[in-house]
Amino acid sequence: MTASIVAATFIVTEGDYLEAVIEVGGQRLHVMDEFGGGQMAAGTQFQAELWPMASERDDWDGIFSANPGREKRLLRLEGWRYLALGEVISVDPVVCDCGLLLVEDAFYTRDARCVGEHVGITLARLDACLA
């Protein structure tokens, strides 16, 4: 997976390696705190690396039917789990542009016809580290 570096604002954390809330691009994200949020004051701005961890439970049909609105965004499912909606921008490896971040290797294909397709990928967890 590839990290996306973003400007973030710290909101709150439950502690190191537990759930934290940060704001990125006007969107509140629930993430795994790998950035030491317990040492930050609410409102602290910092550069974060977002590391999406794709779930291995999605099936091909589900991935390609989950984004009929052709969106690029993250929809929170629960906790730090998300449905990443985006567009396939390359194959071998597959990279999906989901707006705030790129999701790499969420599924495997070498079929170039998938480029430009809009997909939905379940993220088992979204990690945030200091950039």
Image (cartoon, rainbow, N blue to C red):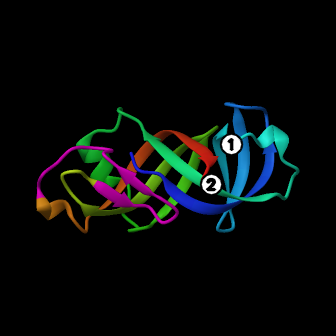
Identity of the residue furthest to the right in this view: 41
Sequence-earlier tag: 1 or 2:
1
The residue drawn where x is 82% and y is 38% is 38
Residue type at tag 1: Phe
- Viewport quadrant of the N terminus: top left
**How much space separates mark 1 and mark 2, taking CA atoms?**
8 Å
Q: Residues within 10 Å of mark 1 (few under 14, many from 20)?
A: many
Pointer 1 with pointer 2, Cβ within 8 A? yes
User: Which residue is at the front of the view, 50 or 130?
Assistant: 130
Q: Nearer the viewer, residue 47 or 22?
A: 47
SS at badge 1: loop
Circle 2: element type: strand
> In this picture, which residue range is highlighted in magenta?
95-111
What's under tag 2, amino acid-wise? Ala
Residue at screen point 11% across, 55% down? 111
**From the viewer's perspective, is 94 left or right of 111?**
right
The one of 69 and 123 positioned closer to us in this rendering:
123
Mark 1 = which residue? 35
Q: Disc number at residue 48?
A: 2
Identify the residue at horizontal 74%, vertical 39% (top origin): 36
Q: Residues within 10 Å of mark 2 (few under 14, many from 20)?
A: many
Q: Residue at x 67, y 31 (%)?
A: 17
Residue 65 disc label = none
Horizontal side of residue 71 vs 16, given as left or right: left
Q: Percent from the top left, x then y, of residue 75?
A: 55, 54
Q: Is residue 77 above or below residue 9?
A: above
